[in-house]
Image (spheres, grey):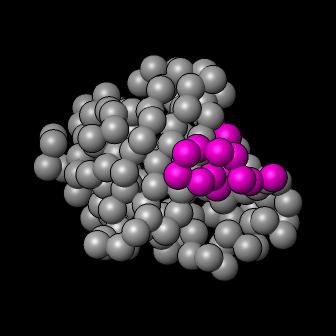
Amino acid sequence: MTPLLVKTDADRLEVTFERELPASAADVWRSWTRAEELEAWWGPIGWTTTVRALDVRPGGLWHFGMGPAGEAREVWIRSIYTEVITGTALSYLEGFSDDQATDLDPEPNNVTVEFIELDPGITRLVMRVRFASAERLEAIIARGLLGGWESAFDRLEQHVEVGA
């Protein structure tokens, strides 16, 4: 597996995740824009994800729940896409919700994901998560953001390898 590069920029209130994946940008894009593919890899190892809504367009809703396998959903997330450049980039506002997609988060995160094809079959994925406040950044990191994403990116790499 390729290493996950993580950079935390406290001044910009941002965490950047970067990983090279053994698949085309089109394949990696599909893994982020189809419900069945997201459910196959999204979340830390040992967790499952259920996508309730996925409308990949500006203004579209992505609503999902995730939690440890075999247990009730621990976390519900509601994201609203702000920009979609097919095959190249996704941006969305992401925050906690209930199981009906009611927004429960006064400080949503701004997420941007870039899909950069380096060579045929090799894609660099760059995800930037910008937080509304230093307190929010610290709280989310304390909840395991970095380890959770490392685990999820491991699952993503395995997923695209199998599909490639």
Start and end of the magenta stretch? 92-106
x then y, percent, for residue 85: 52, 21
**Closest to the observer: 87 or 22?**
87
Residue at the spot 33% in from the left edge and 62% down from the top edge: 48
Q: Is residue 98 left or right of residue 115?
A: right
Residue 124, image quadrant: top left
Q: As rendered, which of 20 and 57 lies closer to the eye?
A: 57
Residue in the foreground of this view, choosing between 103 and 59: 103
**Residue found 62% across the figure and 76% down from its top:** 143
Tell me if residue 97 is in the magenta stretch.
yes
Quadrant of the rendered image containing residue 79: top right
Question: Which residue is outermost to the front?
Answer: 100
For the view shown, which residue lies furthest in the bottom direction? 142
Instruction: Say which quadrant the C terminus sits in.
Output: top left
Query: How many marks are shown on the rendered structure?
Result: 0
Question: Which quadrant would residue 78 be assigned to in this image?
Answer: top right
Query: For residue 147: magenta?
Result: no
Report the residue at 55% width, 70% height from top: 146
Q: Is residue 45 visible?
A: no
User: Which residue is located at x 28 percent, y 72 percent?
Assistant: 70
Most common SS among magenta residues? loop
31 and 126: which is toward the camera? 31
In the rendered image, the quadrant that contains the N terminus is: bottom left
